[in-house]
Amino acid sequence: MRNPAICMLIFMIFAILTSCLKENVNTMEPSSSLIGSNWTVVNDATSESAGASTPARSSNYIGKAGDYFNFTTYGKLYWSINGQRDTATYLISGDTIKFKSAYIDGQTNMVDSAYYPIYTISNLTNHTCTLFNSMIFFGLNGSGGPVLTTINLKK
């Protein structure tokens, strides 16, 4: 009786370990090395839900020559869309791109330098990348609501 019980225990441990290993193999998280480079903008689709006094809106900007996202290996993101340029300090965590927010808190005059999630990465290959963002804005006089942005990039 002892031998079958030990064999069953070894079999169960082996089954659990191989099951966990299979899970880890199938889990693919974006890496800095795969996203870290220069991308051109295919399109930037944005939709805003209707507020109490504003209609819903949507737009689909088609990328032009000179529109880009450049993720550097040292954590800086440079981008230009339709002539609007900006820079951010970024960090990739799982499937999320986080931006470092550096502002002075008006109450304590302390600099907040935490990273905040901005984009969810999907469809990441050697030649394509999709960035998704959803935020809720509250405006005046019933305006505001969810704003969904999808940016498609290519190499």
Image (tube, rainbow, N blue to C red):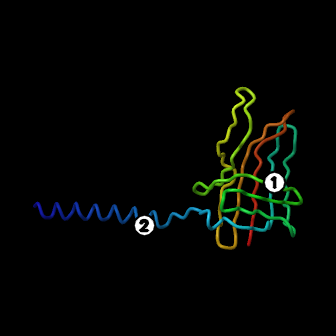
Residue picked out by circle 2: 22
Which element type, helix, strand or loop, lies under badge 1? strand
**Residue in the foreground of this view, choosing between 136 and 71:** 71
Residue lying at 56% horizontally and 62% vertically, measured from the top left? 29
Q: Amino acid at mark 1?
A: Asp
Relative to residue 62, is residue 2 drawn left or right? left
Q: How many marks?
A: 2
Given contact means CB atoms under 8 Å apart, are the residues at marks 2 and 1 in contact?
no
Relative to residue 15, is residue 33 drawn left or right? right
- Badge 1 local density, few (<14 within 10 Å), some, or many (20+)? few
The answer to whether 135 is drawn above or below residue 72 in the figure is above
The answer to whether 48 is drawn above or below residue 68 in the figure is above
Residue picked out by circle 1: 86
Q: Position of residue 119 (x, y in %)?
A: 69, 54
Write down the quadrant of residue 112 in the picture: top right
Relative to residue 24, is residue 9 drawn left or right? left
The answer to whether 71 is drawn above or below residue 136 in the figure is below
Cα gap from disc 2 to disc 1, whole angstroms: 41 Å
**Residue in the foreground of this view, choosing between 102 and 154:** 102
Furthest toward the left, the residue is: 1
Q: Position of residue 59 (x, y in %)?
A: 85, 57
The answer to whether 109 is drawn above or below residue 16 in the figure is above
Furthest toward the top, the residue is: 107
Q: Position of residue 15 (x, y in %)?
A: 32, 64
